[in-house]
Amino acid sequence: MATKVPSITVAPPGPKARAVLVRDERWIATTTKTSPLVVKRAEGSVIEDVDGNTYIDFTCGVSVLNVGHGHPLVTSAIKEQVDAFTHYAGTDFYYDIQTRLAPPGGGRRRCSSRTAGRRRTRPP
């Protein structure tokens, strides 16, 4: 990964990124994409696109990874979870870790985990 960022060696979007954008436009539903950035890899708060350009990632996974990409504690927890199981819907089945992580600040609110980018709490 580059030590100096940003480092733009190919005018974005580069040829590899443009190929992905064409396929995306043909096959993927338009949602919230706002820039033609096609990420190849990321480390800490630096991302590299498929054409070799590097950027400072001010979003770090849009608040999903606000400790940066590849943080050792996060990757360790992911590896531990994958060894147990990868996924099932906590909205459909009971899930121990949800009950341990849910209480926001020890308050008397209920938590609803969603994948749509929304968070909602309400009194019991």
Image (tube, rainbow, N blue to C red):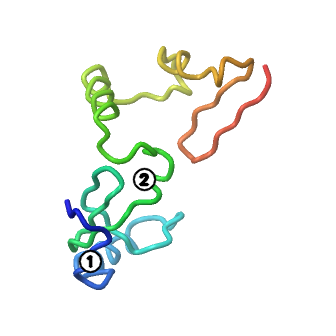
**Can you give x and y, in whole percent of width and height, for residue 87 in the image?**
38, 30
Q: What residue type is labelled 1?
A: Ala
- Which label belongs to residue 19? 1
In this figure, which residue is indicated by the disc labeled 2?
A: 60
**Can you give x and y, in whole percent of width and height, for residue 20 in the image?**
29, 72
**Can you give x and y, in whole percent of width and height, for residue 79 in the image?**
26, 29
User: Mark 1 and 2 residues: CB-CB less than 8 Å, in contact?
Assistant: no
Residue furthest to the bottom in view is 11
Residue at 73% of width from left, 22% of height from top? 109
Q: In this view, does 35 lie to the left or right of 47?
A: right
Residue at 37% of width from left, 63% of height from top? 56
10 Å crowding of disc 1: few (<14), some (14-19), many (20+): few
Q: Is residue 30 left or right of residue 15?
A: right
The N terminus - image quarter: bottom left
Q: In which quarter of the view is residue 76 placed?
A: top left
Residue at 50% of width from left, 71% of height from top? 34
Q: Which of marks 1 and 2 is nearer the N terminus?
A: 1
Q: Is residue 108 left or right of residue 42?
A: right
Residue at 43% of width from left, 44% of height from top? 65
The C terminus - image quarter: top right
- Work out whether 95 lies above or below 62: above
- Is label 2 in a helix, a strand or a loop? loop
Q: Which amino acid does label 2 sit on?
A: Cys
**Can you give x and y, in whole percent of width and height, for residue 40 in the image?**
25, 61
- Work out whether 84 lies above or below 76: above
Q: In which quarter of the view is residue 114 placed?
A: top right
- Is label 1 in a helix, a strand or a loop? helix
10 Å crowding of disc 2: few (<14), some (14-19), many (20+): some
Camera-side residue of 74 and 85: 74
